[in-house]
Amino acid sequence: MKNSELFWQKSILKFDSSIEQAISNLNNSGLKIVLVVDGKNEFIGTISDGDIRRGLLANLNINDTIKNIIHYEALVVPPEFTKESVLKLMELNQIFQVPIINSQKNIVGLFLRHSILVENERNNIMVIMAGGIGKRLLPHTENCPKPMLEVSGKPILEHIIERAKSEGFKNFILSINYLGEMIVNYFGTGEKMGVNIDYVREKKPLGTAGSLSLLNLKTEDPFIVSNGDVITDIRYGELLDFHNKNNSTATMAVNQYEWQNPYGVVGLDGIDITGFDEKPIHRTHINAGVYALSKNALSFLEKDSHCDMPKLFEQLMASSQKIIAYPMHEPWFDVGRSADLNKANKKK
């Protein structure tokens, strides 16, 4: 556990800030907590990643203020608390950060469990679907599989693996088909990247979930699945923890998508005009192409048969299995078209 000088100050945010500013604060501080203060710099609450995700699920958007997502009853300790006492408090309440607040309600420090700063090694497997043809990306994919297209000088697949490795993942299975040997030749066993890579070879295109039926998992642990054309800053470990905490069979990362009607909308009741909505914004949640699955989800797949992930989720739902959404706010690119590839290269 660590309580150093002023490292916590970068996590402070004013109570009238936006959700977008809270997201930026979380990403920039790396402390996984926002400390919210009022106009007098008095502490009023905290915001965690989970608070933001719950707000997005409740149809708040990133331009809304943080007032509706603040945890006003956050656990705090006075400066005289010992580190040993705080650690016991953290263990009892299953939390990783505790603000230190003085008698004037000012923030004077932040206790952190050491494990929150150093990523633990995860033995869970990550499966990456890398067998697609990428027809919409022709001619880029004429002689190159889509996951091997370069973004900022490295294949998309390498970005995905490096991101997961930084969170402690070390065991990967790549599902390959179209020009799959190019992927094998590039990554091999994963030794050069300091990870373990195995392969599942599709004899025919099996969709975004079908090749999971070919897995021969020797563990009962849940695993991560990612499309091979998704570049994102999502924290795979937190997705897995969210999946486990909710005892889910299948968890889908979802991204909020906004679309603005370019026209003013007229509300009607028969021929009577009931109101006007000028260029309304519509918000929906879209499939982000990243999932956490429990092993028993595989029993709903027919071996070596085509199946897309939404179909698998529908089958699980029809069988009363628990399927949930993990709302994400991190940067996300689905590299499905040439315009997306260009955008990813500019942003990454």
Image (cartoon, rainbow, N blue to C red):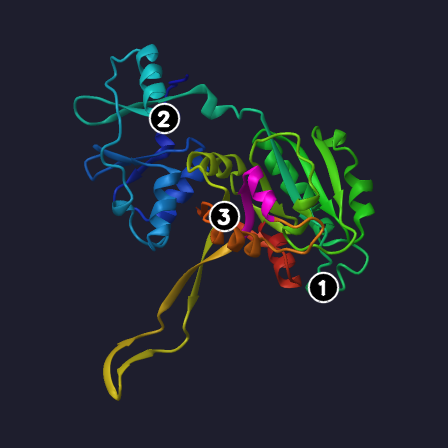
Q: Is residue 317 left or right of residue 151?
A: left
Given residues 176 and 315, the one toward you in this image is 315
Image quarter (top left, top right, bottom left or bottom right) of the N terminus: top left
Given residues 176 and 161, the one toward you in this image is 176
| Pointer 2 with pointer 3, Cβ within 8 A | no
Q: Which mark is residue 135?
A: 1
- Report helix, strand or loop for mark 1: helix
Amino acid marked by disc 3: Ala
Residue 5 visible in the snapshot: yes
Amino acid marked by disc 2: Ile
Structural crowding at the residue carrying mark 1, measured as other residues with C-alpha within 10 Å and reported as few (<14), some (14–19) or many (≥20): few
Given residues 193 and 21, the one toward you in this image is 193
Amino acid marked by disc 1: Lys
Q: Which residue occupies 73% across, 58% down?
A: 133
Q: Is residue 235 left or right of residue 137?
A: left
Structural crowding at the residue carrying mark 2, measured as other residues with C-alpha within 10 Å and reported as few (<14), some (14–19) or many (≥20): some
Q: Is residue 291 magenta?
A: yes
Q: Which mark is residue 253?
A: 3
Structural crowding at the residue carrying mark 3, measured as other residues with C-alpha within 10 Å and reported as few (<14), some (14–19) or many (≥20): many
Q: Which residues are magenta?
A: 288-300
State the CA–CA distance, disc 1 to disc 2: 46 Å
Q: Which residue occupies 64% across, 41% down?
A: 127
State the CA–CA distance, disc 3 to disc 1: 25 Å
Q: Is residue 247 above or below residue 86?
A: below
Mark earlier in primary sequence (2, 3)? 2
Mark earlier in primary sequence (3, 1)? 1
Q: Would you name the residue on which mark 2 appears?
A: 95
State the CA–CA distance, disc 2 to disc 3: 23 Å
Q: Quadrant of residue 265?
A: bottom left
Mark earlier in primary sequence (1, 2)? 2
Residue 35 at x, y = what percent? 31, 34
- Report helix, strand or loop for mark 3: strand
